[in-house]
Image (spheres, rainbow, N blue to C red):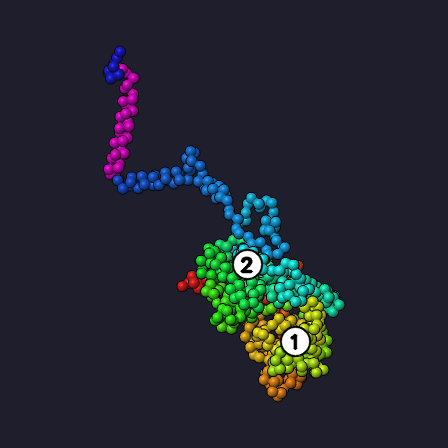
Amino acid sequence: MVPAYSPEVQPQKKPAKSSNCVKNTLNSIRSHLSSHPRFWLFIAFLWIQALIISIARTPPPCFPDRTATAAAAVAAVPVPTPLRFIPPHDDVVSASNSKSATNATQPEPPPARFNDDCPSGRVYAYELPSVFNRDLVLQNCTDLDRWNWECGIISNHGYGRAASELRRLLPGDLYKSWYHTNQFTLEVIFHHRILKHKCRTLDPESATAFYIPFYAGLAVGKHLWTNDTAARDRHCKTMLRWVKNQKHWKNFNGSDHFTTVGRITWDFRRLTDPGQKWGSSYLNMAPMQKIARFIVEKFPGDEMDVSVPYPTGFHPKTKENLLQWQNYIRDHNRQTLFTFIDTNRNWADNDLRKLLMDYCKEEPTCHHVDCAVSDCPTNSSVSLNPLLESEFCLQPKMESYTSKSVFECMVAGAVPVFFWKTSAAAYEQYEWFLPGEPESYSVLIDHDDLKNGTSSVKEFLMRYSKEEIRKKREKLIENIPRIIYAKPNGGIKSFKDSFDIALDGVLERIKEEKEWADFL
């Protein structure tokens, strides 16, 4: 066997030549590198960069596409279903029923917090335990029970049963916008409207504000005429403990929360001895100092109280219904100078209400309606017809500054006559809803002038010309949308009413407070 290194093996000569060529090439490269080191270092850098880019853009076949994997992982994560509040009555409208079957497995993303429809943000309604709202409402009575103040609150989402008896009084279909609405039903109406509102969100993370659907007026009102002051506060304290334990309360300590109170503020401000004083201490409790509340009559010194109009019986479904009513009361023939509607409660002799009642009974230019003997609660025409036929309606101070009758008067197109500056709705209350110039739609007569006999109602009102009265009435008619609660679930509402103004106002206020806090 011949060794591989033997010179006799001829085939080894050609490779030797090739080897020399390679050596020469390497020597040449080495020579160039030694003579131009920086140039070749730059070329090597570019080559390495190109190699890295190529590897990054083209993953090896043994690894999956990372972008596709990430998208698949996100799609596979189940989206938690947000808490949904079940409406307090029979109008349960499930969000799932309004979605198509194709969306059942592909949930829609939450809407933007701010858009053209909701420029001040969205509202989230808590799902309170039913003991704080639904269970407080009497289910087995109607507004036909005139002796029970709670009856009629639940029916028709708080609007009450239809006032069909007005068919004989009003022309055409105008009667269809009228209902027997309980004056204490504000909490139910607001709750129902918020659940249906376009700016309601089911995702609390996307909410600007949080609504607490607590029926405080019903919870406290049941015990106002008893000596059990602890019972007046029981629901209030328990509800506040529940809300304070919620995650979103803790974010801003409740300052982005609001609620509705269906009775006057004085029913919730027991200040001293709890065994002797009227009402609940609900609005004096520490957590309530942060919560905005819509209330039918506010405490002037508390900026968290926001006065909203009492609910009247007029609830138009569409703008056309509203316009028909405005035209009707504008052109209605009013043959009586003024009307006084009251309930005789054995007032003291020096009470202005008694003086007005006695005066009106004897004055031919006055139409007096005593709801203590008339069927006012169940027959709307008893009070509505006199208001429609009168130029003015007398509004003395009741147990509080204002009353439902103030708004019933204005909705009927009669000019309200006040006797105390504080009792005039726009003077100390309802600045969000009524014009800033009270004299543009109302009349103020000093009650002292009536009591000392230096003036009479008839003499004072006769000073106004027909044109002056017409201008005041026109201002009232223009303002009616702002003092009523529409019934939009029966049609498409194309105007802002009291509820819209209230909700827009509180959302904007909370939004600005949050923006200011972020700025600081």
- Residue 309 seen: yes
SS for dot 1:
loop
Q: Give the residue drawn at x 27%, y 22%.
A: 16
Residue 373 within the magenta-colored segment of the rendering:
no
Mark 2 crowdedness (10 Å alpha carbons): few <14, some 14-19, many ≥20? many
Mark 1 crowdedness (10 Å alpha carbons): few <14, some 14-19, many ≥20? some
Within the image, what quadrant is residue 380 found in? Answer: bottom right
Instruction: Give the image location of residue 390, x and y in percent.
Output: 69, 77
Q: Specify whether 246 is left or right of 310.
A: left
Residue 22 within the magenta-colored segment of the rendering:
yes
Position of 84 relative to 67 (above/below): below
The numbered mark at residue 344 is: 1
Asked whether disc 1 touches disc 2, contact meaning CB atoms under 8 Å apart, the reply is no
Q: What is the total number of numbered labels drawn onto the structure image?
A: 2
The quarter of the rendered structure image containing the C terminus is bottom left
SS for dot 2:
helix
Q: CA distance from mark 1 to mark 2?
A: 35 Å
Q: Specify whether 326 is left or right of 244.
A: right
Q: Which residues are magenta?
A: 8-36
Q: Amino acid at mark 1?
A: Asn
Q: Nearer the viewer, mark 1 or mark 2?
A: 1
Q: Give the residue drawn at x 54%, y 75%.
A: 428
**Observer-nearest of 378 and 406:** 378
Q: Report the magenta stretch's main SS.
A: helix
Instruction: Give the image location of residue 1, x and y in percent.
Output: 26, 11
Q: Give the residue drawn at x 25%, y 34%.
A: 30
